[in-house]
Amino acid sequence: MNIAFIGIGSMGAAIAPHLVAGGHAVSVWNRSAAAASALHGVTVLSAPAEAFVHHDVVITMLADDNAVRSVILDSGALDSAESGVTHVVMSTISPALVEELQHAHERAGVAYVAAPVFGVPATAARAELNILAAGADEAVERVMPLFELIGKKVWRLGTDPRHANIAKIAGNLMITQAIESMAEATALTESYGLAASDFLAVVTQTLFASPSYQRYGRNIAQGSYEPGFKLTLGLKDVNLALQAAAERMAILPGAQIVREHMLEAVRDGLGDKDWSILAQAVHRRAGLGGTRG
Amino acid sequence: MNIAFIGIGSMGAAIAPHLVAGGHAVSVWNRSAAAASALHGVTVLSAPAEAFVHHDVVITMLADDNAVRSVILDSGALDSAESGVTHVVMSTISPALVEELQHAHERAGVAYVAAPVFGVPATAARAELNILAAGADEAVERVMPLFELIGKKVWRLGTDPRHANIAKIAGNLMITQAIESMAEATALTESYGLAASDFLAVVTQTLFASPSYQRYGRNIAQGSYEPGFKLTLGLKDVNLALQAAAERMAILPGAQIVREHMLEAVRDGLGDKDWSILAQAVHRRAGLGGTRG
Amino acid sequence: MNIAFIGIGSMGAAIAPHLVAGGHAVSVWNRSAAAASALHGVTVLSAPAEAFVHHDVVITMLADDNAVRSVILDSGALDSAESGVTHVVMSTISPALVEELQHAHERAGVAYVAAPVFGVPATAARAELNILAAGADEAVERVMPLFELIGKKVWRLGTDPRHANIAKIAGNLMITQAIESMAEATALTESYGLAASDFLAVVTQTLFASPSYQRYGRNIAQGSYEPGFKLTLGLKDVNLALQAAAERMAILPGAQIVREHMLEAVRDGLGDKDWSILAQAVHRRAGLGGTRG
Amino acid sequence: MNIAFIGIGSMGAAIAPHLVAGGHAVSVWNRSAAAASALHGVTVLSAPAEAFVHHDVVITMLADDNAVRSVILDSGALDSAESGVTHVVMSTISPALVEELQHAHERAGVAYVAAPVFGVPATAARAELNILAAGADEAVERVMPLFELIGKKVWRLGTDPRHANIAKIAGNLMITQAIESMAEATALTESYGLAASDFLAVVTQTLFASPSYQRYGRNIAQGSYEPGFKLTLGLKDVNLALQAAAERMAILPGAQIVREHMLEAVRDGLGDKDWSILAQAVHRRAGLGGTRG
């Protein structure tokens, strides 16, 4: 297939090569052309609008609502789109923006597939992403061969694209709450002299023997928070969750608590560390003085 | 060994038979004699004090601080204890009570081993408990053969018995926070039309592919909360955590939130359901009207 | 002076007559002309833009950010404004919008005075408003004679118009927290059999012998919440406070709690009642079953 | 009347002289005899039990539950009490302890009147206390002449002594929430450049023109927190409120927030400052860095 890939950040740069390796013709566009040019075997586009002509599929992996709005909507990229194109939007964006995008895509005759993922750049590099896919069945079917090249498993979440995005947002929220809970639990054990590492060794091999607990538990146990998923990006996602909840008048008290701790950590200048560093803010509130554990 | 087992509730009744099957002479005491008599191959004792004479090891599995205080301390059972007995206390009790018990045991010349467990009666029946053991090394070594009969794995947490108890309490707290987080996340997805079951199917097989998430996630997905670990007992444990934290002037904001939801569910008359029913209180606060989600 | 008054809602309708009575020539504009025509002794304008020509002072009392943005900015009303006009904005709006308005007014050569008030329509009808005024000194001086016609007292808050607005928002937030605190305190006393009315009689005549406690305490004591300041408007103001705080990365945990209770009450269909009805949500969470106001 | 006064702390020392001045024969007992001896015109007792014989009225003003339990119950003071004595307990104590005391007093034939007060030592010195009185009508009537000597006003709260105590506790809770709300509001205004003092000047003369707001608002505006009512004592009272609520399964979310901030301030070593210093913890959480009071 002819594929246009928009957004060559750390995730996009890890995903696109698998499409090339799969034998597809891949064009790329990125705000800074340097990142695009660094990829092997791809054609560099000079404007987002070019992605929506002469390609079967456009894949977008941009950072946030603002980037997607700017590149896809405000740029007018859809105005000249060829009817019949399928647009796979992998970004983690708000359900409100998805709804707006859906309308714009309908008008342009472009099929819209939401496909946010669970996974970090390293996961993408190993083509082991978990892909949450939602959109019209025939559109999703069309791009399934591409998903198989870049992911470990595709989770079909029906035909409403917003469902994939809300699932991604809710899943990320759960990760932050898992970190919060490890931080509170270790604050408690440490206040009685039981080291965080000793405690976490038990629970992350028993009750919570899962990837996310083990990954972030290790950070907390070692007091080492890099490299990883930036706290500022994590806070952005929690804000998406709370904003989406507010639009439904839903109250999420635990999420609110986590947001406060993330905000405190960002204020402390830790925004570029892995988001599990919110544990430091939790430890300080618990009275451990921010000295980790 | 000659073993006395105090407390034949649902946990004790599932554990004691493995000791009998292991070839040990087992005497039992229970407040209501009926439960004790129902066990095969055991001798029934008529008072807790009898456990501390003519036995090598006493194992106590009572419900809470009050029960342990009443049966072990207030009864005077330790007054006539033979020196050299090892007392394995498997109950989930407060670090404050452990400290008090330690002093009383020292005076009586009885070795104290804390051994709370992760696992429900069904786990105990399969002899697959995770045992958190802490106490003087030689005392723990003495009872390791017994632990091997009843557990899947023993986690040694040093020589301070309180460390085993605070680990158990902190672990249980983490379970409630995991339930809270699934409840909040599904409240969010449902408010956008994505069913809790569809969302939980994804995250409990990916990010949170661990026993506790799968067990309680199933309850939330199905809106079915029995049988299980009673909410009232779970609330007791969260109160233990918050009380223990308060004694160290530690603030655990997420735990506080969970406590509120558990309390609301108890007030709603749901105290006998599985503790994951706290999800109902979360869903109602989120605005799902208590209709599960 | 020639005065144009924009926004004849319940507040505007109570304020404007005092200007007429003070001997000023008053023109008015309102989205629905009926409300404007109902006033005696005024000229009705047909567009907001007319307010900014042939008048010395424009006074705007519109409901919220959206209304002000639409009527003042999006309408292009400032484009044809006569230089030298003074615009007194009495609406409770966000500091972010004030900043945007300031720039637009500067470009148009119109002086901007922020003058939000403490007081309900009945207070306005008695010309007893407390006016929070901020803006360039000469501009504020120019309109002081008008303030004296409509208010009991003018509180000068310097030259930065945002300061008047943030003070108004913060003051309203304090009112909601006062209501919250009376609701929590009475939930506690009632749970021990001491009636809310008996308790509130004491504290609103001693520690809290102030207008706001007495006014809202009466509502709570009587379980009667109308007429008054609409809950939905109050929630709007608390959201303004939290949004303004978020822009400064400030965490206001008590405000967050109040917001949740207001949201719950709105969800319960009580949005048109006086905002002190948030006490009902507090009482229900406290376990009083919502049975007493 | 013959009056025995138990507890000559800062409050007792300010109250007792008014009874002497009123022409009553006053005996006093205090744990440290020095404070008792320092009073003029009184007889010093050598044990609490002496208070309950040869006196018409015993007045107790001790610090907290522990002190009252120790001096009145554990000492056996009531065992030899003369029937017909009236005991006025002015301490702020838990409803649970009041209930226990009531039973003990009934057995001893001593009438129990609860009479906690609003007011600090300076208020007591001016005989301007607000007295919350509850107990059997004839007992309260008997001591009304004494109340008139020491207080500005007596608030009768019925015949159940616990009602006076829960009212006192709830009132104190409201004070802490008022402080919290001033702290949050000023955190917000300061984050936009409006000084706390400028803002508080407005609201404590308008919406919140009451003694408690003015007193504590002044502290916050000046960043000066001494002398006053000790934070540790205030935290004790908030803990009483939360404990009393927990016994009724009542949830008080705002009180919980305030407790956290008080605890943080105590942890920071500020326990001896006026309790309005909780504002510092609020300001720090809001991001003001604790740099202004």
Image (tube, coloured by chain):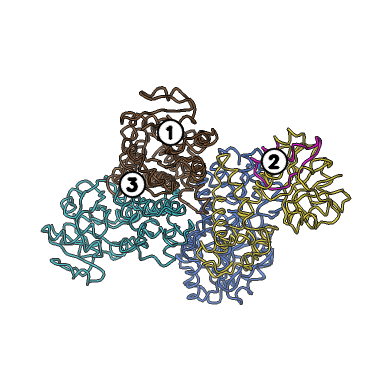
Chain colours: A cyan, B brown, C blue, D yellow
What amino acid does circle 1 point to? Lys
**How many C-alpha atoms fall within 10 Å of the one at disc 3: few (<14), some, or many (≥20)?**
many
Q: Position of residue D207 (x, y in %)?
A: 65, 58
Inter-mark Cα distance, 3 to 2? 49 Å
Letter of the chain that mark 3 sits on in the rendering? A
The answer to which quarter of the image holds residue D70 is top right
Foreground: disc 3 or disc 2? 2
| Disc 1: which residue | B273
Q: Is residue D282 above or below residue D49?
A: below
Inter-mark Cα distance, 2 to 1? 41 Å
Q: Position of residue A33 (x, y in %)?
A: 22, 71
Q: Nearer the viewer, residue B120 or D186?
A: B120
| Disc 2: which residue | D73
Foreground: disc 2 or disc 1? 2
Q: Residue furthest front?
A: B83
The answer to which quarter of the image holds residue B231 is top left
**What is the magenta range?**
D74-102
**Residue D88 lies within the magenta run:** yes
Q: Is residue A9 above or below residue B29?
A: below
Inter-mark Cα distance, 3 to 1? 23 Å
